[in-house]
Protein backbone atom coordinates (compact mmCIF):
# COMPACT_ATOMS: atom_id res chain seq x y z
CA UNK A 1 0.00 0.00 0.00
CA UNK A 2 1.36 3.42 -0.92
CA UNK A 3 2.52 5.61 1.96
CA UNK A 4 -0.29 8.14 1.57
CA UNK A 5 -3.10 5.59 1.75
CA UNK A 6 -1.36 3.77 4.58
CA UNK A 7 -1.23 6.96 6.62
CA UNK A 8 -4.93 7.62 5.98
CA UNK A 9 -5.82 4.12 7.06
CA UNK A 10 -3.70 4.33 10.21
CA UNK A 11 -5.23 7.71 11.03
CA UNK A 12 -8.77 6.34 10.69
CA UNK A 13 -7.87 3.32 12.84
CA UNK A 14 -6.35 5.63 15.45
CA UNK A 15 -9.45 7.86 15.71
CA UNK A 16 -11.85 4.92 15.64
CA UNK A 17 -10.07 2.98 18.39
CA UNK A 18 -9.09 5.91 20.58
CA UNK A 19 -12.70 7.07 20.81
CA UNK A 20 -13.77 3.44 21.34
CA UNK A 21 -11.21 3.04 24.12
CA UNK A 22 -12.55 6.10 25.93
CA UNK A 23 -16.16 4.86 25.77
CA UNK A 24 -15.28 1.29 26.73
CA UNK A 25 -13.05 2.33 29.62
CA UNK A 26 -15.77 4.67 30.90
CA UNK A 27 -18.32 1.81 30.75
CA UNK A 28 -15.83 -0.47 32.51
CA UNK A 29 -15.88 1.88 35.48
CA UNK A 30 -19.68 2.03 35.36
CA UNK A 31 -19.60 -1.77 35.65
CA UNK A 32 -18.54 -1.37 39.29
CA UNK A 33 -22.03 -0.05 40.01
CA UNK A 34 -23.88 -2.21 37.48
CA UNK A 35 -22.21 -5.46 38.58
CA UNK A 36 -21.27 -4.95 42.27
CA UNK A 37 -20.82 -8.70 42.72
CA UNK A 38 -18.05 -8.58 40.07
CA UNK A 39 -16.25 -5.50 41.39
CA UNK A 40 -13.20 -7.61 42.26
CA UNK A 41 -12.98 -8.99 38.72
CA UNK A 42 -13.33 -5.52 37.19
CA UNK A 43 -10.69 -3.97 39.46
CA UNK A 44 -8.24 -6.84 38.96
CA UNK A 45 -8.65 -6.56 35.19
CA UNK A 46 -8.21 -2.79 35.19
CA UNK A 47 -5.07 -3.12 37.32
CA UNK A 48 -3.51 -5.23 34.56
CA UNK A 49 -4.31 -2.55 32.00
CA UNK A 50 -3.30 0.44 34.10
CA UNK A 51 0.49 0.43 33.44
CA UNK A 52 -0.06 0.12 29.69
CA UNK A 53 -2.68 2.86 29.68
CA UNK A 54 -0.44 5.13 31.73
CA UNK A 55 2.44 4.67 29.28
CA UNK A 56 0.20 5.50 26.32
CA UNK A 57 -1.17 8.60 28.00
CA UNK A 58 2.40 9.70 28.80
CA UNK A 59 3.48 9.30 25.17
CA UNK A 60 6.34 6.89 25.80
CA UNK A 61 9.22 5.95 23.55
CA UNK A 62 8.62 4.19 20.27
CA UNK A 63 10.88 1.29 21.27
CA UNK A 64 8.55 0.61 24.22
CA UNK A 65 5.57 -0.12 21.96
CA UNK A 66 6.74 -3.63 21.13
CA UNK A 67 7.00 -4.56 24.80
CA UNK A 68 3.57 -3.09 25.50
CA UNK A 69 2.07 -5.13 22.64
CA UNK A 70 3.63 -8.26 24.10
CA UNK A 71 1.93 -7.47 27.39
CA UNK A 72 -1.38 -7.00 25.56
CA UNK A 73 -0.86 -10.33 23.80
CA UNK A 74 -0.52 -11.93 27.23
CA UNK A 75 -3.69 -10.26 28.51
CA UNK A 76 -5.50 -11.25 25.34
CA UNK A 77 -4.52 -14.89 25.87
CA UNK A 78 -5.62 -14.88 29.51
CA UNK A 79 -8.94 -13.26 28.71
CA UNK A 80 -9.58 -15.61 25.81
CA UNK A 81 -8.97 -18.62 28.06
CA UNK A 82 -11.35 -17.20 30.66
CA UNK A 83 -13.98 -16.67 27.97
CA UNK A 84 -13.53 -20.22 26.65
CA UNK A 85 -14.25 -21.59 30.10
CA UNK A 86 -17.25 -19.31 30.50
CA UNK A 87 -18.56 -20.31 27.05
CA UNK A 88 -18.24 -23.97 28.03
CA UNK A 89 -20.52 -23.32 30.99
CA UNK A 90 -22.95 -21.59 28.63
CA UNK A 91 -22.99 -24.68 26.38
CA UNK A 92 -23.61 -26.94 29.37
CA UNK A 93 -26.38 -24.75 30.74
CA UNK A 94 -28.14 -24.72 27.35
CA UNK A 95 -28.32 -28.53 27.49
CA UNK A 96 -30.04 -28.46 30.87
CA UNK A 97 -32.29 -25.58 29.82
CA UNK A 98 -33.53 -27.87 27.03
CA UNK A 99 -34.36 -30.52 29.65
CA UNK A 100 -36.05 -28.12 32.07
CA UNK A 101 -38.13 -26.52 29.33
CA UNK A 102 -39.55 -29.90 28.36
CA UNK A 103 -40.72 -30.83 31.83
CA UNK A 104 -42.01 -27.37 32.73
CA UNK A 105 -45.63 -28.20 31.92
CA UNK A 106 -45.61 -31.03 34.44
CA UNK A 107 -45.32 -28.46 37.21
CA UNK A 108 -46.59 -25.14 35.82
CA UNK A 109 -50.17 -24.38 34.81
CA UNK A 110 -50.00 -23.10 31.23
CA UNK A 111 -52.40 -22.54 28.35
CA UNK A 112 -52.86 -25.65 26.19
CA UNK A 113 -51.70 -25.69 22.57
CA UNK A 114 -54.78 -25.77 20.32
CA UNK A 115 -53.04 -26.81 17.07
CA UNK A 116 -52.59 -30.42 16.10
CA UNK A 117 -49.01 -31.33 15.17
CA UNK A 118 -49.98 -31.28 11.48
CA UNK A 119 -51.56 -27.83 11.75
CA UNK A 120 -48.63 -26.48 13.70
CA UNK A 121 -46.07 -27.78 11.20
CA UNK A 122 -48.03 -26.21 8.34
CA UNK A 123 -47.85 -22.84 10.08
CA UNK A 124 -44.12 -23.30 10.68
CA UNK A 125 -43.52 -24.11 7.02
CA UNK A 126 -45.50 -21.02 6.00
CA UNK A 127 -43.14 -18.91 8.12
CA UNK A 128 -40.07 -20.62 6.68
CA UNK A 129 -41.38 -19.98 3.19
CA UNK A 130 -41.52 -16.21 3.73
CA UNK A 131 -37.72 -15.89 3.78
CA UNK A 132 -35.74 -15.38 0.59
CA UNK A 133 -32.51 -15.01 2.58
CA UNK A 134 -30.63 -18.32 2.68
CA UNK A 135 -28.88 -17.47 5.96
CA UNK A 136 -32.15 -16.60 7.71
CA UNK A 137 -33.83 -19.72 6.35
CA UNK A 138 -30.95 -21.88 7.56
CA UNK A 139 -31.10 -20.24 11.00
CA UNK A 140 -34.85 -20.90 11.24
CA UNK A 141 -34.44 -24.53 10.23
CA UNK A 142 -31.74 -24.97 12.87
CA UNK A 143 -34.11 -23.50 15.47
CA UNK A 144 -36.75 -25.97 14.32
CA UNK A 145 -34.40 -28.95 14.65
CA UNK A 146 -33.07 -27.70 18.00
CA UNK A 147 -36.55 -27.52 19.55
CA UNK A 148 -38.32 -30.54 18.07
CA UNK A 149 -38.58 -33.63 20.31
CA UNK A 150 -35.79 -36.16 19.78
CA UNK A 151 -36.87 -39.84 19.72
CA UNK A 152 -33.98 -41.57 17.95
CA UNK A 153 -32.09 -44.65 18.93
CA UNK A 154 -28.39 -43.96 19.37
CA UNK A 155 -27.52 -45.86 16.20
CA UNK A 156 -30.06 -43.91 14.17
CA UNK A 157 -28.67 -40.67 15.58
CA UNK A 158 -25.06 -41.65 14.81
CA UNK A 159 -26.10 -42.48 11.26
CA UNK A 160 -27.63 -39.01 10.87
CA UNK A 161 -24.43 -37.41 12.17
CA UNK A 162 -22.34 -39.37 9.63
CA UNK A 163 -24.70 -38.44 6.78
CA UNK A 164 -24.72 -34.74 7.58
CA UNK A 165 -20.96 -34.56 8.02
CA UNK A 166 -20.43 -36.10 4.57
CA UNK A 167 -21.28 -32.73 3.04
CA UNK A 168 -17.85 -31.52 4.19
CA UNK A 169 -15.90 -33.97 2.03
CA UNK A 170 -13.40 -31.85 0.10
CA UNK A 171 -13.37 -29.03 2.65
CA UNK A 172 -10.24 -27.76 4.40
CA UNK A 173 -9.10 -30.08 7.20
CA UNK A 174 -8.08 -27.25 9.51
CA UNK A 175 -11.50 -25.66 9.25
CA UNK A 176 -13.18 -28.98 9.94
CA UNK A 177 -11.04 -29.50 13.02
CA UNK A 178 -12.59 -26.28 14.30
CA UNK A 179 -16.08 -27.61 13.51
CA UNK A 180 -15.44 -30.84 15.42
CA UNK A 181 -14.09 -28.85 18.37
CA UNK A 182 -17.30 -26.79 18.39
CA UNK A 183 -19.43 -29.95 18.24
CA UNK A 184 -17.51 -31.59 21.09
CA UNK A 185 -17.81 -28.55 23.36
CA UNK A 186 -21.51 -28.02 22.56
CA UNK A 187 -22.17 -31.69 23.39
CA UNK A 188 -20.14 -31.54 26.64
CA UNK A 189 -17.76 -34.16 25.23
CA UNK A 190 -14.74 -31.85 25.51
CA UNK A 191 -14.61 -29.26 28.26
CA UNK A 192 -11.71 -26.96 29.23
CA UNK A 193 -9.39 -28.02 32.01
CA UNK A 194 -9.77 -26.44 35.45
CA UNK A 195 -13.35 -25.33 34.80
CA UNK A 196 -14.39 -25.81 38.42
CA UNK A 197 -11.34 -24.01 39.79
CA UNK A 198 -11.78 -21.09 37.40
CA UNK A 199 -15.51 -20.59 38.07
CA UNK A 200 -16.49 -22.29 41.35
CA UNK A 201 -19.93 -20.64 41.56
CA UNK A 202 -20.85 -21.80 38.07
CA UNK A 203 -19.39 -25.24 38.82
CA UNK A 204 -21.76 -25.56 41.78
CA UNK A 205 -24.75 -24.73 39.58
CA UNK A 206 -23.65 -27.23 36.93
CA UNK A 207 -23.15 -29.95 39.52
CA UNK A 208 -26.68 -29.37 40.82
CA UNK A 209 -28.15 -29.67 37.33
CA UNK A 210 -26.09 -32.77 36.53
CA UNK A 211 -27.18 -34.61 39.66
CA UNK A 212 -30.92 -33.93 39.36
CA UNK A 213 -33.12 -36.96 38.63
CA UNK A 214 -35.18 -35.57 35.76
CA UNK A 215 -37.32 -38.67 35.29
CA UNK A 216 -38.57 -38.55 38.88
CA UNK A 217 -38.33 -34.86 39.67
CA UNK A 218 -41.05 -33.41 41.91
CA UNK A 219 -42.24 -29.79 42.03
CA UNK A 220 -39.77 -28.80 44.75
CA UNK A 221 -36.88 -30.40 42.87
CA UNK A 222 -37.94 -28.71 39.63
CA UNK A 223 -38.18 -25.29 41.32
CA UNK A 224 -34.73 -25.77 42.86
CA UNK A 225 -33.23 -26.64 39.47
CA UNK A 226 -34.93 -23.67 37.83
CA UNK A 227 -33.65 -21.28 40.48
CA UNK A 228 -30.14 -22.71 40.28
CA UNK A 229 -30.23 -22.41 36.49
CA UNK A 230 -31.48 -18.82 36.71
CA UNK A 231 -28.67 -17.82 39.05
CA UNK A 232 -26.09 -19.56 36.88
CA UNK A 233 -27.25 -17.83 33.70
CA UNK A 234 -27.39 -14.45 35.42
CA UNK A 235 -23.77 -14.83 36.51
CA UNK A 236 -22.82 -16.19 33.08
CA UNK A 237 -24.23 -13.15 31.26
CA UNK A 238 -22.72 -10.67 33.73
CA UNK A 239 -19.25 -12.17 33.42
CA UNK A 240 -19.59 -12.40 29.64
CA UNK A 241 -20.28 -8.65 29.55
CA UNK A 242 -17.16 -7.95 31.61
CA UNK A 243 -14.86 -10.23 29.61
CA UNK A 244 -16.13 -8.82 26.32
CA UNK A 245 -15.71 -5.22 27.43
CA UNK A 246 -12.23 -6.00 28.76
CA UNK A 247 -11.30 -7.55 25.40
CA UNK A 248 -12.56 -4.49 23.53
CA UNK A 249 -10.36 -2.26 25.69
CA UNK A 250 -7.33 -4.50 25.06
CA UNK A 251 -7.94 -4.41 21.31
CA UNK A 252 -8.41 -0.63 21.32
CA UNK A 253 -5.07 -0.23 23.09
CA UNK A 254 -3.43 -2.59 20.61
CA UNK A 255 -4.67 -0.54 17.64
CA UNK A 256 -3.40 2.65 19.25
CA UNK A 257 0.07 1.19 19.68
CA UNK A 258 0.19 0.11 16.05
CA UNK A 259 -1.17 3.33 14.59
CA UNK A 260 -0.22 6.25 16.83
CA UNK A 261 3.33 6.85 15.48
CA UNK A 262 2.17 7.41 11.89
CA UNK A 263 -1.40 8.63 12.32
CA UNK A 264 -2.43 12.18 11.50
CA UNK A 265 -4.04 13.37 14.72
CA UNK A 266 -6.29 16.19 15.81
CA UNK A 267 -4.81 17.86 18.90
CA UNK A 268 -8.20 18.99 20.23
CA UNK A 269 -9.63 15.46 19.88
CA UNK A 270 -6.62 13.94 21.60
CA UNK A 271 -7.02 16.36 24.49
CA UNK A 272 -10.63 15.26 25.00
CA UNK A 273 -9.63 11.59 24.80
CA UNK A 274 -6.85 12.05 27.34
CA UNK A 275 -9.03 14.14 29.68
CA UNK A 276 -11.72 11.46 29.96
CA UNK A 277 -9.25 8.57 30.22
CA UNK A 278 -7.22 10.33 32.90
CA UNK A 279 -10.36 11.19 34.86
CA UNK A 280 -11.66 7.62 34.83
CA UNK A 281 -8.18 6.26 35.54
CA UNK A 282 -8.06 8.48 38.65
CA UNK A 283 -11.42 7.17 39.84
CA UNK A 284 -10.18 3.59 39.53
CA UNK A 285 -6.99 4.44 41.40
CA UNK A 286 -8.88 6.07 44.29
CA UNK A 287 -10.90 2.90 44.95
CA UNK A 288 -14.50 2.70 46.02
CA UNK A 289 -17.33 3.62 43.67
CA UNK A 290 -17.64 7.35 43.30
CA UNK A 291 -19.95 9.25 40.96
CA UNK A 292 -18.26 10.36 37.76
CA UNK A 293 -17.68 14.09 37.60
CA UNK A 294 -20.40 15.77 35.55
CA UNK A 295 -17.90 17.64 33.37
CA UNK A 296 -16.28 14.33 32.49
CA UNK A 297 -19.61 12.83 31.46
CA UNK A 298 -20.45 15.93 29.42
CA UNK A 299 -17.13 15.54 27.57
CA UNK A 300 -18.43 12.26 26.13
CA UNK A 301 -20.70 14.27 23.83
CA UNK A 302 -17.57 15.52 22.05
CA UNK A 303 -16.92 11.95 20.89
CA UNK A 304 -20.18 11.77 18.97
CA UNK A 305 -19.71 11.05 15.29
CA UNK A 306 -15.99 10.22 15.48
CA UNK A 307 -16.37 6.47 14.96
CA UNK A 308 -19.03 7.01 12.31
CA UNK A 309 -16.73 9.28 10.31
CA UNK A 310 -13.68 7.04 10.73
CA UNK A 311 -15.33 3.67 9.96
CA UNK A 312 -15.85 4.18 6.18
CA UNK A 313 -12.10 4.84 5.81
CA UNK A 314 -11.17 1.46 7.27
CA UNK A 315 -10.88 -0.29 3.91
CA UNK A 316 -8.26 -3.04 3.83
CA UNK A 317 -6.88 -4.66 0.70
CA UNK A 318 -7.61 -8.37 0.26
CA UNK A 319 -4.00 -8.92 -0.81
CA UNK A 320 -2.46 -6.76 1.89
CA UNK A 321 1.17 -7.73 2.59
CA UNK A 322 1.85 -5.29 5.43
CA UNK A 323 1.79 -7.31 8.69
CA UNK A 324 0.72 -4.30 10.78
CA UNK A 325 -2.26 -3.60 8.54
CA UNK A 326 -3.28 -7.27 8.48
CA UNK A 327 -3.21 -7.26 12.27
CA UNK A 328 -5.23 -4.04 12.35
CA UNK A 329 -7.83 -5.62 10.10
CA UNK A 330 -8.27 -8.49 12.55
CA UNK A 331 -8.42 -6.17 15.54
CA UNK A 332 -11.08 -4.04 13.85
CA UNK A 333 -13.04 -6.96 12.39
CA UNK A 334 -15.78 -6.85 15.03
CA UNK A 335 -14.69 -10.26 16.38
CA UNK A 336 -13.02 -9.37 19.68
CA UNK A 337 -11.41 -12.76 20.22
CA UNK A 338 -10.10 -13.18 16.66
CA UNK A 339 -6.66 -14.71 16.23
CA UNK A 340 -4.04 -12.08 15.41
CA UNK A 341 -1.38 -14.42 14.10
CA UNK A 342 -1.38 -15.62 10.50
CA UNK A 343 -2.73 -19.12 9.93
CA UNK A 344 -0.37 -21.56 8.31
CA UNK A 345 -1.19 -22.37 4.71
CA UNK A 346 -1.22 -25.77 3.09
CA UNK A 347 -3.98 -27.61 4.97
CA UNK A 348 -5.13 -30.63 2.96
CA UNK A 349 -8.69 -31.15 1.73
CA UNK A 350 -10.66 -33.71 3.71
CA UNK A 351 -11.41 -36.86 1.73
CA UNK A 352 -14.18 -39.31 2.59
CA UNK A 353 -11.92 -41.47 4.73
CA UNK A 354 -10.76 -38.48 6.78
CA UNK A 355 -14.33 -37.27 7.39
CA UNK A 356 -15.56 -40.80 8.20
CA UNK A 357 -12.77 -41.34 10.71
CA UNK A 358 -13.44 -38.00 12.42
CA UNK A 359 -17.18 -38.69 12.50
CA UNK A 360 -16.60 -42.17 13.92
CA UNK A 361 -14.30 -40.75 16.60
CA UNK A 362 -16.87 -38.11 17.54
CA UNK A 363 -19.70 -40.64 17.74
CA UNK A 364 -17.51 -42.88 19.89
CA UNK A 365 -16.99 -39.97 22.28
CA UNK A 366 -20.75 -39.36 22.35
CA UNK A 367 -21.40 -43.03 23.08
CA UNK A 368 -19.06 -42.90 26.04
CA UNK A 369 -20.76 -39.72 27.28
CA UNK A 370 -24.27 -41.16 26.85
CA UNK A 371 -23.47 -44.33 28.79
CA UNK A 372 -23.57 -42.46 32.09
CA UNK A 373 -26.23 -39.91 31.23
CA UNK A 374 -29.98 -39.70 31.88
CA UNK A 375 -32.20 -40.11 28.82
CA UNK A 376 -33.67 -36.56 28.88
CA UNK A 377 -30.14 -35.14 28.89
CA UNK A 378 -29.06 -37.50 26.09
CA UNK A 379 -31.92 -36.16 23.97
CA UNK A 380 -30.85 -32.60 24.73
CA UNK A 381 -27.30 -33.34 23.55
CA UNK A 382 -28.65 -35.00 20.38
CA UNK A 383 -30.76 -31.94 19.59
CA UNK A 384 -27.80 -29.62 20.17
CA UNK A 385 -25.55 -31.63 17.84
CA UNK A 386 -28.12 -31.98 15.05
CA UNK A 387 -28.94 -28.26 15.10
CA UNK A 388 -25.27 -27.42 14.44
CA UNK A 389 -24.82 -29.80 11.53
CA UNK A 390 -25.76 -28.93 7.94
CA UNK A 391 -29.46 -29.07 7.18
CA UNK A 392 -30.05 -31.81 4.58
CA UNK A 393 -33.74 -31.41 3.72
CA UNK A 394 -34.06 -31.68 -0.06
CA UNK A 395 -37.68 -30.54 -0.24
CA UNK A 396 -40.50 -28.97 1.78
CA UNK A 397 -42.20 -32.36 1.95
CA UNK A 398 -39.08 -33.90 3.48
CA UNK A 399 -38.95 -31.15 6.11
CA UNK A 400 -42.68 -31.57 6.79
CA UNK A 401 -42.25 -35.31 7.24
CA UNK A 402 -39.35 -34.80 9.64
CA UNK A 403 -41.17 -32.20 11.78
CA UNK A 404 -44.52 -34.02 11.90
CA UNK A 405 -42.83 -37.33 12.66
CA UNK A 406 -40.89 -35.76 15.50
CA UNK A 407 -43.99 -34.26 17.13
CA UNK A 408 -46.27 -37.27 16.57
CA UNK A 409 -43.71 -39.73 17.93
CA UNK A 410 -43.52 -37.80 21.21
CA UNK A 411 -45.97 -39.53 23.56
CA UNK A 412 -45.17 -37.15 26.42
CA UNK A 413 -47.82 -34.54 25.62
CA UNK A 414 -46.41 -32.04 28.11
CA UNK A 415 -43.06 -32.20 26.30
CA UNK A 416 -44.71 -31.99 22.89
CA UNK A 417 -46.65 -28.87 23.84
CA UNK A 418 -43.51 -27.35 25.39
CA UNK A 419 -41.63 -27.86 22.11
CA UNK A 420 -44.44 -26.29 20.10
CA UNK A 421 -44.62 -23.36 22.50
CA UNK A 422 -40.86 -22.75 22.26
CA UNK A 423 -41.00 -22.82 18.48
CA UNK A 424 -43.99 -20.49 18.58
CA UNK A 425 -41.91 -17.94 20.47
CA UNK A 426 -38.82 -18.32 18.28
CA UNK A 427 -40.45 -18.37 14.85
CA UNK A 428 -43.69 -16.46 15.26
CA UNK A 429 -43.11 -13.86 17.99
Image (cartoon, grey):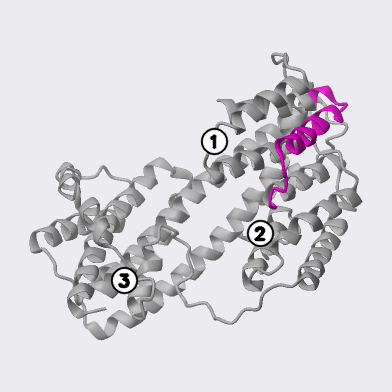
Give the residue number, with chain letter if any, for mark 3.
52
Secondary structure under badge 3?
helix
Per the model, the C-alpha gap separating discs 2 and 1 is 27 Å
Marks 3,2: beta carbons within 8 A: no
Secondary structure under badge 2?
helix
Q: Indicate the position of residue 382 as horizontal and vertical percent values.
A: 78, 47
Residue at the farthest left position = 268
Which image quarter holds the C terminus? top right
Camera sees residue 426: no
Q: Residue at x 87, y 42 (%)?
A: 152
Q: Nearer the viewer, mark 3 or mark 1?
A: 1
Q: Indicate the position of residue 393 as horizontal and vertical percent values.
A: 72, 44
Q: Residue at x 50, y 70 (%)?
A: 77
Is 130 on the left-hand or right-hand side of 385? left
Residue at the farthest bottom position = 63
Q: Is residue 277 above or below residue 137?
A: below
Q: Nearer the viewer, residue 49 or 337?
A: 337
Please tell me how crowded label 2 is: few (under 14), some (14-19), or many (20+) other residues with Cα within 10 Å.
some
Which of pointers 3 and 2 lies earlier in the amino acid sequence?
3
Q: Is residue 138 above or below residue 188?
A: above
Please tell me how crowded label 3 is: few (under 14), some (14-19), or many (20+) other residues with Cα within 10 Å.
some
Which of pointers 3 and 1 lies earlier in the amino acid sequence?
3
Magenta span of residues: 389-414
Secondary structure under badge 1?
loop
Q: Nearer the viewer, residue 208 or 327?
A: 327
Give the residue number, with chain letter if any, for mark 1.
131
Please tell me how crowded label 1 is: few (under 14), some (14-19), or many (20+) other residues with Cα within 10 Å.
few
* Residue 408 included in the magenta stretch of the image: yes
| Residue 182 numbered mark, or none | 2
Which of pointers 2 and 1 lies earlier in the amino acid sequence?
1
Amino acid sequence: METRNRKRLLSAAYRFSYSGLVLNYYMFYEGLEEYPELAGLIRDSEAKLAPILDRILAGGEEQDDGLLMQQLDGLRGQNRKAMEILSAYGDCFSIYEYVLNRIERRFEKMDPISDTPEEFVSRVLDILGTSNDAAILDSRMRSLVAQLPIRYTRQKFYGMVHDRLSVYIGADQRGLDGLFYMLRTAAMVQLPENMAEAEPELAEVLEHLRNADYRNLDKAGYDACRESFRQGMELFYSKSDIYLLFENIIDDLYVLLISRREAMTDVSEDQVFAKILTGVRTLFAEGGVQPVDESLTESLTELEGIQESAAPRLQFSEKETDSDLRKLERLLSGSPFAELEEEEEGSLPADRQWVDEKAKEFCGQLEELFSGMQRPVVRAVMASVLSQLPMMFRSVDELREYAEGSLLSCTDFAEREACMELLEKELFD
